[in-house]
Amino acid sequence: MNPINDIIKKIFGRISSLTGGNVGAAVGIDIGSSAIKVVEIKIKEGKIVLETYGSIALGPYDSLDVGRVTNLPVEKIDHYSDRSPQVYSIADYGSFTRLFHPAGERIFF
């Protein structure tokens, strides 16, 4: 039994409850000050595989060069949202994070 695999299975299991039961896939979105990046990972044959990724620079939407930090005004942000479950992430340096485990459950890192 590999503790890392157990942790990964638990993460995918929790994500699957948000994605309607699709245990083998997850999507990550990083919204930064200069770009938005998206990755899709899947479990294939017991291994985590990067299925696809994408990135879009925000500078050109504010008349700046690619890679430049920007603070886009609300009027320049196109958005779309549906009622599907969503997960968000905040950078560690900008937040306080504490992970709680159910009583009796042991997690090894």
Image: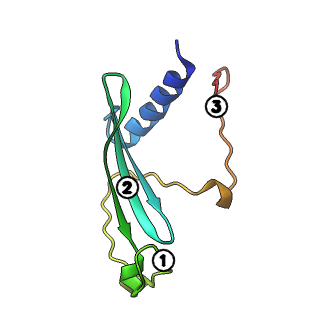
Q: CA distance from mark 3 to mark 1?
A: 40 Å
Q: Is residue 35 left or right of residue 2?
A: left
Nearer to us: label 2 or label 1: 1
Q: Who's the residue at 63% across and 25% down the image? A: 107
| Displayed quadrant of residue 41 | top left
Q: How is the image coloured?
A: rainbow
Count neighbours of disc 3 (C-alpha within 10 A) and say few if under 14, some if 14 to 19, many if 20 or more.
few
Q: Where does label 3 land, which residue?
A: 101
Q: Who's the residue at 48% across and 55% down the image? A: 88
Q: Who's the residue at 67% across and 25% down the image? A: 103
Q: Amino acid at mark 2?
A: Val
Q: Amino acid at mark 1?
A: Arg
Q: Secondary structure at mark 2?
A: strand
Q: Are marks 3 and 1 in contact (CB under 8 Å)?
A: no
Q: Amino acid at mark 3?
A: His
Q: Secondary structure at mark 3?
A: loop
Q: Where does label 1 land, which residue?
A: 68
The mark that comes first in sequence, 2 or 1, is 2
Nearer to us: label 2 or label 3: 2
